[in-house]
Amino acid sequence: EEQLVESGGDLVQPGGSLRLSCAASGFMFSSFGMSWVRQAPGKGLQWVSSIGSGGTTTYYADSVKGRFTIFRDNSKNTLYLLMNTLRVEDTAVYYCAKLTAGGTAYWGQGTLVTVSS
Amino acid sequence: QPVLTQSSSASASLGSSVKLTCTLSSGHSSYIIAWHQQQPGKAPRYLMKVEGSGSYSKGSGLPDRFAGSSSGADRYLTISDLQSEDEADYYCEAWDTNTRVFGGGTKVTVL
């Protein structure tokens, strides 16, 4: 059974940093692109970043470009999101997701990031 | 990049049908989209992809009550024989080479 388990969410002050992790199991992790998608409280889904299966190709939403870094360790079946210079507006549940040719095909359960002083 | 437009809400009676629309922006009418369901307090769940031709491919375990279709720049999700557990937010998703976008979501209420 496919599984994506996020961790690392926490309460952090504005300007701080955080690293999210997503442990994958039940599928060939190294064969799939992956994404991070976030959802602010009471709001809709917002794409944050994607990475190719090999880890060399990365894409970012304009709102996080230059502050967030997506990377992966295929030997550990783990996806990461390093978030620097965090802002109050980055407060959200962050979902890890598996990509296929048919779109975002599987979602993790999410991890909450709260940016507040 | 594509922009996706969804109605904010829809409602239908238990056992009836509801048809949700996701409209692609000008110049993007051929794009494939994906539909996702998010029940209250839960993570999103992938439902299906819908192509411009109207063909659709469902995720594993999705009941036959869920179907996709297409017309021009519009992509549809039809839920038949509505059940209480279908009360949820439904999002469409499109993607480009270097970006992904979601519609604003449609909240479905089962009366």
Image: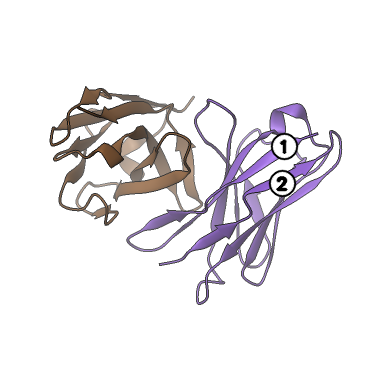
Chain colours: A brown, B purple
Corner quadrant of residue A36 = top left
Q: Quadrant of the C terminus of chain B?
A: top right
Q: Is residue B25 above or below residue A65?
A: below
Examine the rendering and report whether any part of residue B94 can be seen: yes
Tell me which numbered mark, 2 or 1, is placed earlier along the sequence: 2
The chain ID associated with circle 2 is: B
Under mark 1, the amino acid is Thr
User: Please, which residue is most extreme toward the front here?
Assistant: A117
Numbered mark located on residue B10 in the image? 2
Under mark 2, the amino acid is Ala
Percent x, y for residue B61? 65, 33
SS for callout 1 = strand
Percent x, y for residue A68? 19, 44
Residue occupied by mark 1? B109
Examine the rendering and report whether any part of residue A77 can be seen: no
SS for callout 2 = strand
Q: Is residue B73 above or below residue A17?
A: below
In front of the other: B59 or B81: B81
- Marks 2/1: CA distance? 6 Å
Q: Is residue A114 above or below residue A30?
A: above
Q: Decide: few, some or many residues near mark 2? Use Cα within 10 Å; few <14, some 14-19, many ≥20.
A: some
Q: Residue at x 49, y 30 (%)?
A: B43
In front of the other: A112 or B35: A112
In this picture, residue B35 sits left or right of residue B96: right
Q: Is residue A104 above or below residue A62?
A: above
Asked if disc 2 and disc 1 are in contact, CB closer than 8 Å, the reply is: yes
The chain ID associated with circle 1 is: B
Percent x, y for residue A67? 16, 46
Q: Residue at x 47, y 37 (%)?
A: A106
Q: Quadrant of the N terminus of chain B?
A: bottom left
Q: Decide: few, some or many residues near mark 1? Use Cα within 10 Å; few <14, some 14-19, many ≥20.
A: some
